[in-house]
Amino acid sequence: MWFVSFLISSIGKKMIMATTGLLLFLFLCTHVAGNATIYMSREVFQGYADELHSHPLIVLVFSTLFLLIFLLHIGTGLFLFYQNWKVSRSRYAVSTRVVKNTFASETMPYTGLIILAFLLVHIFSFTFSAEDVPISETVKQLLGGFTYSLFYIVSFIALAFHLSHGFWSMLQTFGVNHPRYNFIISKLTLIFPLFFLIMFAGIPLYFMTGLGASF
């Protein structure tokens, strides 16, 4: 079938990366909105968490979809990285580049693996937490501890680097590339990663600095 042939082509794989990347980006937008309630008060965050988990079927469906999308994104990304690595080692490979890759683009597979490790630890920590302890208390305990908080911050620094190149690459794949918009795009590749870094990594700092003592 032509559709299968397209998906297994180089362009098709890039389109898979861009589409799954966009879906993961939208997930980040919704997740950061929920996490932002932490800065409001314990009651607001607990109310948000209780409302969310009062619909277990919806949570299960979206969690499963998210997992499938994330695995597809990782699998395709690692396959493209392997293909590029084989080409770079080929005797026919070009030894010089017209444009030197940025640090973010060169480290995409590694920052992606850091993000994967974070998700596994993060999901495990909250999924297997004590059922009789409110989620707000679990958040405060985990993100108030130095080791977990440091890992949390480093992971979102990795996400910021990953997103700074991934967002630009996604737009290029979708054909959003025009001199009229490139200046705005270049700014967005900085604004979005910094926004998520501040909002997410700011949570452990919120607790560790004592600002969240009354949470």
Image (spheres, rainbow, N blue to C red):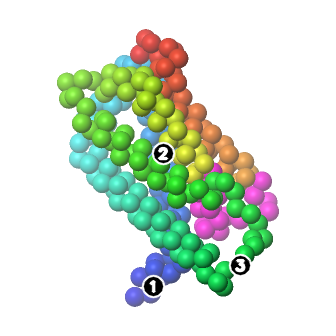
Q: Label 2 sits on what residue type?
A: Leu
Q: Which residue is mark 3?
A: 94
Local crowd at mark 2 within 10 Å, few (<14), some, or many (≥20)? few
Q: Residue furthest bottom?
A: 1
- Can you identify the residue that label 1 sits on? 5
Residue at (39% x, 19% y) in the render: 42
Q: Which of disc 1 and disc 2 is earlier in sequence?
A: 1
Give the residue drawn at x 31%, y 36%: 125
Q: Look at label 1 and name its amino acid.
A: Ser
Residue at 26%, 48% (x, y): give it.
Answer: 60
Instruction: Give neighbour class at mark 1: few <14, some 14-19, many 20+ (Cα, 10 Å).
Output: few
Q: Position of residue 185 (x, y in %)?
A: 70, 54
Q: Is residue 156 above or below residue 36?
A: below
Q: Amino acid at mark 3?
A: Val
Residue bearing the label numbered 2:
28
User: How far apart in space, not on screen, are marks 2 and 1 (Cα)?
Assistant: 31 Å
Instruction: Report, in whole angstroms, how far the alpha carbon at label 3 lies from the one at label 2.
Output: 37 Å
Magenta residues span 164-183
Q: Nearer the viewer, residue 111 or 134?
A: 111
